[in-house]
Amino acid sequence: MNEEKEVEEQSKPLVLEKLEEHHADALLAQDEMRGTVVVVVRKEQAYAVLEYLKTDAELAYTFLVDVTAVDNSQMESELMQFDYARFMVVYQLYSYQGQCRLRVKVPVHESDLSIPSVTALWKGANWLERETYDMFGINFEGHPDLRRILMPDDFEGHPLRKDYPLRGRGERERFNFDKQNV
Amino acid sequence: MGLDFVGRGVGETDGNIITTSIEKVVNWGRKNSLWPMPFGTACCAIEMMATLASKYDLSRFGSEAIRFSPRQSDLLIVSGRISIKMMPVLKRIYDQMPDPKWVISMGACASCGGVFDTYTLIQGVDQFLPVDVYIPGCPPRPEDLIDAVMQVQQKITSGASPKGVEAVV
Ligand code: SF4
């Protein structure tokens, strides 16, 4: 029994150990999904945690693979877990040094859709955050150029939200060619 | 001479003189030198490229001169999905092409939206452009595109106006 326990404790990923040591109050949950460590982090400390993950010499998650979001408004089980936060902003990180991936999730309430931009940490976050803003309406504070990136500039709404109709609101038939900047 | 617009005059000629109408000569020229403007936005464009490459060799039909300037082309090949953001661009390119101009809508997506029945995809470019020939398929084979070009050629030979002109007149 003791041996088994030891093995289990040893196999605890380094990143979780270090996060528990330095940012224990920011951690809401932790999980593992197909070999990838997943941590859920409080929004207030999200920037500090991401900065720590990137700059810590041992962890060195220097590569921001993706930023996206999930609309959980129709997932009661998910909603209940995190104080009915409708959105979950997801950061996928990769460490070349440790050759491992990490998923950081941040619950965002609909009443306050702002979250600090990480463009200061990773320049590549620029377009990823613009896409997340375009599709979900998440407001990345401190982003240098938060405009739509996929949908036309005059588009209304955020189409990857679950309450947006799949076939749209008639925008694909109603066309004003004069208004568009081509 | 073997030219398909040849018509003989009433009087006997000894084969050195051809009488015909000016439209027929012009159309013969147009038919054999259709310069396509490729508007490839998705997977169908790969088949279009294959059609232009050596194996299928669209130059056999006089259409090897692909023009990436709409002002030098008279055949618009819409091959791929057109999103609501792309539609004004496509419309402008069509408007820039000189008359007479023909339009081929290649594949299910360009013709009706295909499987992408979503908020962002135009459900058929013919809502906004006069399409002369549709090609079904997902993607259509190069033979289908060649067939469509030949149908455009037939239209030209027969003296029919492009859809775009009919719409105006
Ligand atoms: S019709 Fe099929 S092959 Fe052509 S663009 Fe659409 S999905 Fe791609």
Image (spheres, rainbow, N blue to C red):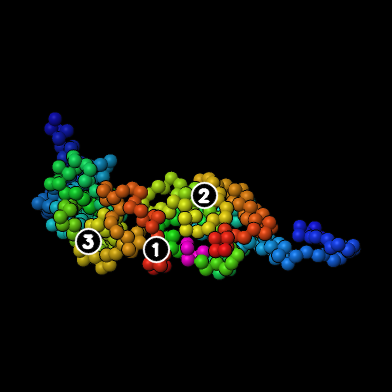
Direction from residue A19 to residue A158 in the image, left or right: right
Q: Amino acid at mark 3?
A: Phe
Q: Which residue is mark 3?
A: A140
| Chain of the residue under the numbered disc 3 shown in the image | A
Q: Nearer the viewer, residue A167 or A124?
A: A167
Residue A69 vs residue B109: left or right?
left
Q: Position of residue B28 (x, y in %)?
A: 71, 62
Q: Earlier in the sequence, mark 3 or mark 1?
A: 3
Would you say the residues marked 3 and 1 are in contact, meaning their CB atoms lie under 8 Å apart? no
A34 and B92: which is toward the camera: B92
> Label 2 marks which chain's residue?
B
SS for tag 2?
A: helix
User: Of the numbered discs in the image, which one, if any, rests on residue A154?
Assistant: none
Q: Position of residue B10 (x, y in %)?
A: 86, 62
Q: Amino acid at mark 1?
A: Asn
Q: Which residues are magenta?
A: B90-94
Q: Is mark 3 within 8 Å of ligand 1?
A: no
Give residue A178's position: percent from left, percent from top: 40, 67
Give the position of the N terminus of chain B as an image quadrant: bottom right
Identified at 22% across, 43% down, the residue is A74
Q: Is residue A106 visible?
A: yes
The residue depicted at 53 percent of the width and 45 percent of the height is B137
Disc 3 versus disc 1: nearer the observer: 1
Q: Which residue does the numbered mark 1 point to in the structure image?
A: A176
CA gap between label 3 and label 1 equals 30 Å
Q: Give the CA distance from mark 2 to mark 1.
A: 25 Å
Mark linked to residue B107: 2
Chain letter of the residue carrying label 1: A
For the point 43% across and 60% down, the residue is B86
Of residues B39 and A140, the one drawn nearer to the viewer in this rendering: B39
